[in-house]
Amino acid sequence: MTKILYIVGNGFDLYHKMESSFSDFKDYVAKKNKPVFDAVERYLIPNSEKQEWNGLEQALGCLDPDEIIDEVSPFMESYGSEDWEECAHYDAQFETEKITENLSSELMTLLTQWASQLNKTTPAHKTLNLDKDALYISFNYTDTLISTYEIPAQNILFIHGRESVNDKLIMGHSTHPQDKPLTEEQLEGEDPRLSQTKEIIRNYFKKTFKNTGDIANKHRKFFSKLTDIRKVIVLGHSLSDVDSEYYRTLTSIKCIASADWKIAIRDIKDKEDKEDKEDKEDKEDKEDNEEKEEKEKAINRLKNKGIFIPHPEFIFWKDLGDFVGKSSK
């Protein structure tokens, strides 16, 4: 019997009509905590590559230290100024902590609350035949695999935490804090308030860093089970840069590197409304070109991460029944 490893990402929950995207999280944060929402919109999203909430994890590493320092510098009144008061000594640090806490601890609290709410929703009806004897790595916080497909919990590694058992959920960027342009040492003659402000920002980067190497090592018992995998099926995971080290770890396992990989990618028909006035021939040409482009993007994402999988097969979600199993009726 062929041993299968499924890698499940947020696209899996979206496929089951759950409002689980970071765009949905954006709406939740905007409704529940405006100061956190405003902080993300001001300090993270404009500096990120995607410039949208769907790239929130990597955006956490895009905080500009100089922007924060410039913003709080008016609170560093000169010690010799007539307006100087001793009680104002920590004003700049307080303002910096307020910003960084909104972008870290407060944001994570909201993520946990949102995931709890999401986990209480009912996914769309079961549409796939998944192998209950297979092993699963889920990047989702939800129990869709268990509640909808009755996959045994012991067969699933919830690598970023499982909300329903009160795991500490994981979300973060992939840029090591040491790579951030903030010197550890206090410069000669530097205002101690500035030094303390820098330290607060350094701690922010440490707090929001997702150390995928440590996470994989923590779950080495599960990874040790992956010794006879012959097929890997990726369902709804974007192969994003922030998670690329997980794939590097997986492909270091010989049987996985040589396994038959099948990767689900978005169906163009699901991403955009078709225009009724287009004639059929133009539609078909357009969809063929977009299908080719989508496959090329997925292949390049793998190559750019230095992850080489021999002859991966890319399948649109609409064709899932043909390779995951016949659709359930």
Image (cartoon, grey):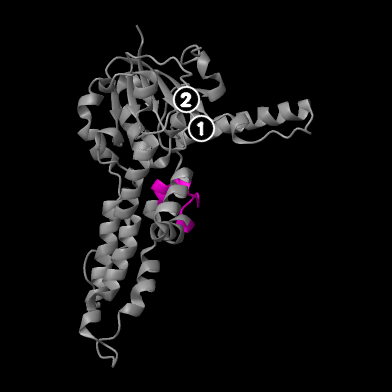
Kindly tell me whether residue 162 is visible in this rendering: no
Q: Are marks 2 and 1 in contact (CB under 8 Å)?
A: yes
Quarter-of-image position of residue 234: top left
- Residue pictured at 25% horizontal, 21% vertical: 154
Query: In the orientation shown, which residue stands out farthest toward the top?
Result: 1
- Residue pictured at 50% horizontal, 11% vertical: 326
Query: Seen in the image, is 215 located left or right of residue 304?
Result: left
Quarter-of-image position of residue 142: top left
- Residue pictured at 48% horizontal, 13% vertical: 328
**Overall secondary structure of the magenta stretch?**
helix
Vertical placement of residue 222 versus 189, above or below: above
Between residues 303 and 328, which one lies in front from this camera angle?
A: 328
* Helix, strand or loop under label 2: strand
Kindly tell me whether residue 240 is visible in this rendering: yes
Q: Which residue is mark 2?
A: 263
Segment colored magenta: 46-59
- CA distance separating discs 2 and 1: 9 Å
- Residue pictured at 43% horizontal, 39% vertical: 240
Between residues 168 and 92, which one lies in front from this camera angle?
A: 168
Q: Which residue is mark 1?
A: 298
Vertical placement of residue 108 versus 263, above or below: below
Q: Is 288 included in the stretch rendered in magenta?
A: no
Indicate the amino acid at tag 2.
Ile
